[in-house]
Image (cartoon, helix red, strand yellow):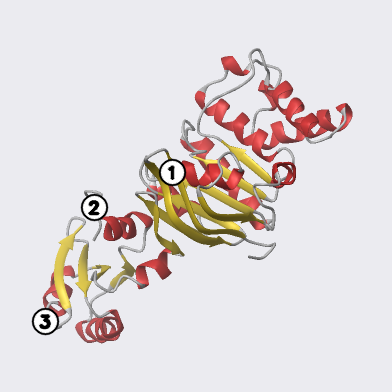
């Protein structure tokens, strides 16, 4: 364990006879980390453990050198955005943030100034004096995020923070997450919408059935899956010609025309041999190629490989 990382060591959490997370061991570095998994996979349990809202049944946790057994220090270090709405009755956006900042020791003038700054940062300046009960779903998501970041924590734990936001709101929040991560913070974002994680994450932690099934960058995780053929999409002016010649390679197990005959999807069991051979094939055939891209270096594809479409292991 080091002071600059979040370390989870052999952590399990039981709810009576029900297993929440099982023997989880991960080290999370600064940057934007996506916590990926379907509903019920253990994402929220792991986040609650990191925040100190739950205690592990077994194992240990260190958040930048702070144990959840040090709640006051952890409170200053971590900002948490829950996926559920829970606000004091009658509170406005401004009063909600002011009260939070008072808990962190700011005086009234400091809290007022910081509240204005944070409301502007999440796009709620005009709504600050309105009651949260009258906010839209997207506005409630924004005020929860404002509460999580208002005390300038080094660790942000955001549980499904993009739910309820329109496309423009999602883009704005993703930009904010990236900005916060570039400042050296740990930003952990959970989502069951896998393409969103592709857009925002430096790395991912994939969780299923309470266990971590993979972690790291998408490309690194995909590179460790040796049993599954790699898919490559070639966009070109003669996909049928590429398909016919590529299928003659001994390690190519599929060649399929896709996207209205504008591309060919190739599957190979030997990427190291495939790419040089594909280059020679293209040069000798005179085909005009637009792009050659791995078609499955995404969270969705990797997650499917690891747990299967039906949720079972492979």
Q: What residue is shown with label 1?
A: 14
Of badges 1 and 2, nearer the viewer stands 1
Q: Which label sits on residue 312?
A: 2
Q: Is residue 13 left or right of residue 223?
A: right
Q: Residue at x 43, y 49 (%)?
A: 21
Q: Is residue 115 left or right of residue 92?
A: right
In this rendering, the answer to whether 88 lies above or below 4 is above
Mark 3 neighbour density, 10 Å: few (under 14) some (14–19) many (20 or more): few
Q: Residue 64: percent from the left, percent from the top?
A: 68, 57
The answer for how far apart the CA atoms under marks 1 and 3 are is 53 Å
The answer for how far apart the CA atoms under marks 1 and 2 are is 22 Å
Q: Residue at x 79, y 36 (%)?
A: 104
Q: Residue at x 29, y 83 (%)?
A: 279
Mark 2 neighbour density, 10 Å: few (under 14) some (14–19) many (20 or more): few
**Image quarter (top left, top right, bottom left or bottom right) of the C terminus:** bottom left
Q: Nearer the viewer, residue 249 or 298?
A: 298
Query: Hey, which quadrant is residue 23 in on the image?
Result: bottom left
Q: Nearer the viewer, residue 78 or 143?
A: 78
Query: Hey, which quadrant is residue 7 in on the image?
Result: bottom right
Q: Which label sits on residue 248?
A: 3
């Amino acid at each position: 364990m080091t002071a600059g990382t979040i370390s989870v060591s052999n952590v399990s959490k039981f709810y009576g006879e029900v297993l929440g997370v099982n023997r989880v061991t991960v080290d999370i570095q600064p940057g934007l980390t996506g916590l990926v998994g379907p509903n019920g996979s253990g994402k929220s349990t792991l986040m609650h453990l990191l925040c100190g809202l739950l205690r592990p049944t077994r194992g240990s946790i260190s958040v930048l050198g702070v144990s959840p057994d040090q709640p006051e220090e952890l409170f200053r270090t971590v900002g948490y955005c829950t996926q559920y709405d829970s606000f004091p009755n009658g509170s406005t956006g401004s009063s909600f943030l002011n009260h939070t900042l008072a808990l962190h020791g700011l005086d009234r003038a400091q809290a007022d100034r910081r509240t204005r700054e944070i409301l502007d940062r999440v796009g709620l300046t005009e709504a600050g004096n309105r009651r949260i009960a009258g906010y839209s779903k997207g506005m409630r998501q924004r005020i929860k995020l404002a509460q999580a970041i208002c005390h300038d924590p080094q660790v942000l734990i955001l549980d499904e923070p993009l739910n309820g936001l329109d496309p423009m709101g999602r883009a704005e929040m993703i930009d904010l997450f990236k900005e916060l991560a570039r400042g050296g913070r740990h930003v952990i974002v959970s989502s069951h919408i896998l393409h969103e994680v592709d857009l925002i994450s430096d790395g991912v932690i994939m969780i299923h059935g309470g266990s971590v099934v993979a972690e790291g960058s998408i490309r690194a995780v995909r590179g460790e899956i040796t049993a599954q053929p790699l898919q490559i999409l070639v966009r070109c002016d003669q996909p049928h010609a590429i398909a016919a010649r590529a299928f003659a390679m001994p390690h190519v197990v599929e060649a399929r025309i896709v996207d209205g005959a504008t591309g060919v999807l190739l599957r190979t069991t030997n990427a190291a041999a495939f790419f040089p051979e594909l280059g020679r094939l293209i040069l000798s055939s005179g085909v005009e190629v637009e792009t050659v891209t791995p078609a499955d270096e995404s969270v969705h594809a990797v997650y499917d490989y690891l747990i299967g479409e039906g949720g079972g292991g492979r």
